[in-house]
Image (cartoon, grey):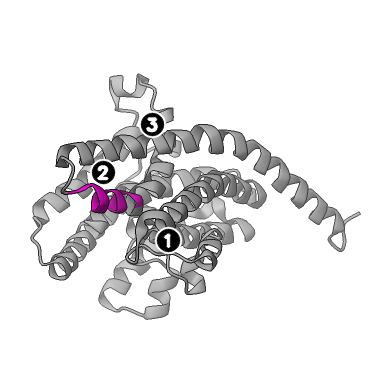
Amino acid sequence: RRHSMTATFFLISGFVILMSAASGSVRSFIVSRVIRLYPAFWAACTITYLVCITWGGPVYAASFKQYLINMTMVSDYLHTPAIDGVYWSLSLEIRFYALITILLLIRQIHRAELFLLIWLAATFALEWHPIGKLRFLLISDYATFFIGGATIYMVWSKGMTPLRALMILCSLILGIMQSIKGMEDICRYYHTEMNPVITALLVISFYAIMLLVALRKTGALAAMRWVTAGALTYPLYLLHQNIGYIIFNHAYPSTNIHLVFWGTIALMLIGAWLIHKLIEQKAAPLLKRVLNRGLDTFSQLSPGRG
């Protein structure tokens, strides 16, 4: 389930990140990523920390030092446990950003399709001949979804070609294989059963929806306003897991299970909306100005600048 459910997250990320980098500007790419990710993350991380120390008990305990390191968004690389279980995906996102940044630095973003093709071939090869460090650097467990999303962006921006169709198909096949393999690991760990056919159908549906968007075949759905719903997905993702578990642990079984379930969903949606309205929309412009001024000052102070 972790593979199949995160497929859509990483597919969208591949699409959006390549779109953000298309201008070829390293500075614009980095600034856009920082203002998109950090304000909501800082807010959600702080809320989660406060809930953990207030109601989390020993299971969801968190120290202040742990909280501060988590606020960097790179706690995984600093050998510090995440305050919330969903943060694991952010460390993968950062690795993907690093790969795109390298393309921008060497001024090869216009050859992104070639890079994606090589990356996809390497990901397939590493499935059969795993090399630990390369698998880490190339995000091999999830790379196929980043590649699939980025290739679908190429379709959206430049049209479908036989090569892009083949790359998307190969990405889908590998995504299904890895999702079923991940499902089997989860079933063993949690002593449960999951249907591989449903897992495969979920992954296929994610690719199909993305392709319909890229080919502009969404019909009446395209006319609907999805901007706010899309904006809420990130803060909702950051808030829902550990806070949700804490609510469940405290409220159930003393409270009606349906009230707990739907009440928690409503609370998470309200929290995501508040973070979007009060934090993201207000902090992002300010943070953008601060970053640009800082980068301007750094450029003026750098050796060789007039």
- Looking at the rendering, the stretch of residues picked out in magenta corresponds to 243-252
Query: Quick one: quadrant of the C terminus?
Result: bottom right
Query: Quick one: quadrant of the N terminus?
Result: bottom left
Badge 3 element: helix
Outermost residue on the right side: it is: 306
Q: Amino acid at mark 1?
A: Ile
First reached walking from the N terminus: tag 2 or tag 3? 2
Query: Which residue is tagged 2?
Result: 206
> Could you tell me how far apart the alpha carbons at marks 2 and 3 are, in whole angstroms?
17 Å
| Badge 3: residue crowd in 10 Å (few <14, some 14–19, many ≥20) | few
> Could you tell me how far apart the alpha carbons at marks 2 and 1 are, in whole angstroms?
29 Å
Q: Is residue 279 left or right of residue 89?
A: right
Q: Amino acid at mark 3?
A: Ala
Instruction: Residue 116: give x, y in percent of width and height.
Output: 42, 57
| Badge 2: residue crowd in 10 Å (few <14, some 14–19, many ≥20) | some
Work out whether 262 lies above or below 120: above
Residue sitting nearer the eye, 139 or 116: 139
The structure residue drawn at horizontal position 13% and vertical position 70%, both measured from the top left corner, is 188
Magenta includes 244?
yes
The structure residue drawn at horizontal position 31% and vertical position 34%, both measured from the top left corner, is 266
First reached walking from the N terminus: tag 2 or tag 1? 1
Query: Which residue is tagged 1?
Result: 83
Residue sitting nearer the eye, 236 or 12: 236
Query: Which residue is tagged 3?
Result: 229
Instruction: Residue 120: give x, y in percent of width and height.
Output: 36, 62
**Mark 3 or 1: the one toward you:** 1
Badge 1 element: loop
Q: Is residue 166 visible?
A: no
First reached walking from the N terminus: tag 3 or tag 1? 1
